[in-house]
Image (cartoon, helix red, strand yellow):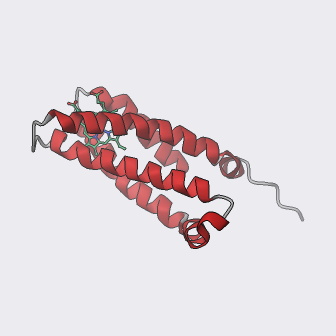
Amino acid sequence: MPTTLLVAFAAEFITREGPDYAIHSWIGIALVGVIALHLVGNARWIKHVWNRKRRHREFGLGVLNATFGAVVGVCIISGFPLWLEWSDAPAWATVHQVTGLASILLMFVHLWKNRTRLKGLVRPRARRV
Ligand code: HEM
């Protein structure tokens, strides 16, 4: 799942300057499903941190993750008026561009803060017999 997310975010970045915004837009829409699965997969951790709030040592990471999610959400939503030409207000492009670039940056911070967990996924500890 983290690999799919990483590939999808990289693809969004690569296709951000067109020429075909259909590919970029469909990958963005597919991201909604992948992010939903990622949240379901981590629901236990999310509930645990949410219930304990500041008493949980990883509350800061929870806040970062929630911010990341909100920024990605605004980015995906603001892509629609641009793609489907609902509005030609330049603000949509600004919002999409700023949240798009912020999403990519936050993705790296998210990966870095979860590096120990990621290492565990790449190289699971050998099972003792
Ligand atoms: C997390 C997902 C996404 C990221 C990180 C992202 C990121 C970006 C970035 C950085 C740009 C470059 C803007 C520029 O340099 O001018 C861009 C452009 C664009 N994106 Fe996205 N995007 C995402 C999802 C979507 C979705 C879901 C749609 C459509 C429903 C979409 C439609 C567009 C369009 C139409 C443009 C061209 C905007 C223009 O004409 O200035 N994007 N995107």
- In this rendering, would 63 be left or right of 75? right
Taking the spot 39% from the left edge, 32% from the top edge, the residue there is 13
Taking the spot 22% from the left edge, 31% from the top edge, the residue there is 20
Specify the quadrant of the image occupied by residue 60: bottom right
- In this rendering, would 26 be left or right of 81? right
Considering every residue shown, the one lying at the far bottom of the view is 51
- In this rendering, would 106 be left or right of 97? right
User: Is 55 situated above or below 25?
Assistant: below
Q: Is residue 23 visible?
A: no
Q: Is residue 16 visible?
A: yes
For the image shown, how many numbered marks are present on the structure?
A: 0
Location of residue 129 in the rendering, given as x and y in whole percent from the top left corner: 90, 65
Taking the spot 74% from the left edge, 53% from the top edge, the residue there is 124
Location of residue 127 in the rendering, given as x and y in whole percent from the top left corner: 83, 60
User: Is 45 situated above or below 71?
Assistant: below
Location of residue 26 in the rendering, given as x and y in whole percent from the top left corner: 28, 45
Specify the quadrant of the image occupied by residue 44: bottom right
Considering every residue shown, the one lying at the far right of the view is 129
Location of residue 102 in the rendering, given as x and y in whole percent from the top left corner: 42, 37
Which quadrant of the render holds ligand 1?
top left
User: Is 96 situated above or below 49?
Assistant: above
Q: Nearer the viewer, residue 78 or 119?
A: 78
